[in-house]
Structures are given as structure tokens and as C-alpha cells.
Amino acid sequence: MRISSCFLGALLAFHGFSSAQTPAAQPLDLRVGAIPATDSTDRITDGGTRTAPTSQYLATPVVGLARDYRVGPNDLIDVEVFDLDNLKRTVRVNAAGAISLPLIGQVVIAGLTSQEVEQRIADRYREKYLQNPQVSIFIKEFTTERITIEGAVARPGIFPLTGRMTLLRALAVAGGFGSIANTSQVMLYRENDRKVREVSVFDVEKIRAGKSEDPAIKGDDLIVVQRDSTRVLLKDSVLRDVIDSINPFSVLGR
């Protein structure tokens, strides 16, 4: 490290940071399992004209998305810098999406993953104070309102629901459609007042053209973008052609 522990203590005293810690809170388990099996209460609607069991529309199980969670306002976070206990803090993200840390002050972290937050904090400490800071964070309390976006999008994951969110805005947060997305088969899973899980199908191209309404997104909604089978076949075909061009004898293995 570039500075000694004694000098670091003096700097902390100069900046007037308190060492009081926020009381510990129980972490919220965001591990997401597979989409529950279809039962008699599952329904799918498209404009209210049709209902049917949802089993044929279920996508790949949503597994391990907690690691992709993006920090939002009101999240409570433990921040540690290896071998420097004086820099350890438990902080809550404010309404502007920032936290305040010793020496470096305000750091905006809203919208970042845990790994990105660690990198941003390390970069700030590296600018003036530490030679090779090793920062680790632990999210103790997640934003209460959140949505899950899965399927053929650029960045699937769990995202905080901040402000007014619509389907188009939610897809933009996830980086937009992937190369094999079926934009006419975007599924929105939501539990109604009777605790029945309903699924609505949206054609995003019609929404973009103003022919359909852009639906509002609510907390705990699950958005699944289906894959376009035609694009999948085309992608596989192109890959097959590339392999054949590199190894003409691969045709023997078909």
C-alpha cells in the first residue's frame, strides 16, 4: 500500500469521517430457481382474447441471476478494503445512487453489478491514496422493488425498479435484444390480486410503431424474451458452413 496505517488514520481524522457502523441487517436471499411447473392456475393472455396453460411458453429456467443484480437506491452495502480496517464501512445507497466513503467521498454506484462497484471504488482509491487496493463488497439489503429480465437479451439479470418503468425501458436496461431474439414473443409474467400467475405476450415491434401500448412494469415482474427458431437455425447453418470451409472432411461426420 502507498500509505501507512498511521498516516491513513490521520487522513481519516482530517476528513472528519465517523467510524460508527450501521446496525447489521439480515441479507435478502435473491437466489432464483427454475420457473415453477405449470398448474391449473397458470394462464396466458394476449389482448384478453385467449387463455391457455402456460407450459408451452415456459423458457429456460432462471438460474443464478443474483450475481447479475444491479445496485439501486436504498440498498445497504458492506465495503471493505483488504488489510485496511479503517476503511471498512456499511453504507446505504442514497436517492441519487451514490454512497459516501472515507477519503474519496461520494461514489455513484447505482446500476452497477457487485464486480463493477468493487472496480469503481478501487479506481477512486487508486487515484490518490492506495497503490493496489483490493476492494470487496457485500449487498446486505437489496432494493425491495425489482424485476427479472431473462432470455434473448444482451444482459439478463435482476434490476432495481426505479421510477416509472415500461416494457421498452426495461428491455433497454437489459441492453436490448440479443441476435436471436423473437421480438414478437416477449413474455411478461405477473401475479395478479388472486395470487394467480398470468403471462401476457407482447410484440415489441408493434409497441415501437405505436400500434400497441407500452405496458407498465411492476415490482417482481419477470420478462422473458423468446428465441427466434428461424434465426437459431440460420446461426447454426452459418456455423456449419464455417466449419466445413475450415475442414472439408467434416461432411463425413454428418
Image (tube, helix red, strand yellow):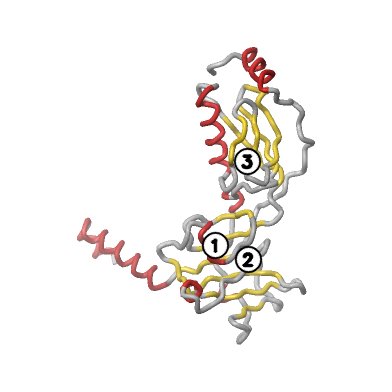
Work out how far the residue at label 2 is from the one at label 3, CA to CA, in angstroms. 24 Å
In the picture shown, does residue 228 fall above or below 135?
below
Image quadrant occupied by the N terminus: top right
Looking at the picture, how far across and down is residue 112, in whole percent?
Answer: 56, 45
Q: Identity of the amino acid at label 3?
A: Ala
In the image, 209 versus 205, the foreground residue is 209
Point out residue 146 in the picture as x, y percentages from the top left corner.
Answer: 65, 57
Q: Amino acid at mark 2?
A: Ile
Mark-to-mark CA distance, 1 and 2: 9 Å
Front label number (2 vs 3): 3
The residues tagged by marks 3 and 1 sit, at their Cα atoms, a distance apart of 22 Å
In the depicted structure, whether residue 176 falls above or below residue 13: below
Badge 2 is on which residue? 217
Asked whether the residues under the numbered discs 1 and 2 touch, taking CB atoms below 8 Å apart as contact, a structural biologist would say yes
Could you tell me residue 67's position as x and y percent? 58, 48
Q: Residue at x 50, y 21 (%)?
A: 131
User: On the image, numbered disc 1 is attached to which residue?
Assistant: 169
Badge 1 local density, few (<14 within 10 Å), some, or many (20+)? some
Q: Quadrant of residue 82?
A: top right
Residue located beneath label 3 in the image: 98
Asked which secondary structure carries label 2, the reply is loop
Q: Which is nearer the N-term, disc 3 or disc 1?
A: 3
Q: Classify the position of the C terminus by image quarter.
A: bottom left
Residue 238 sits in quarter: bottom left
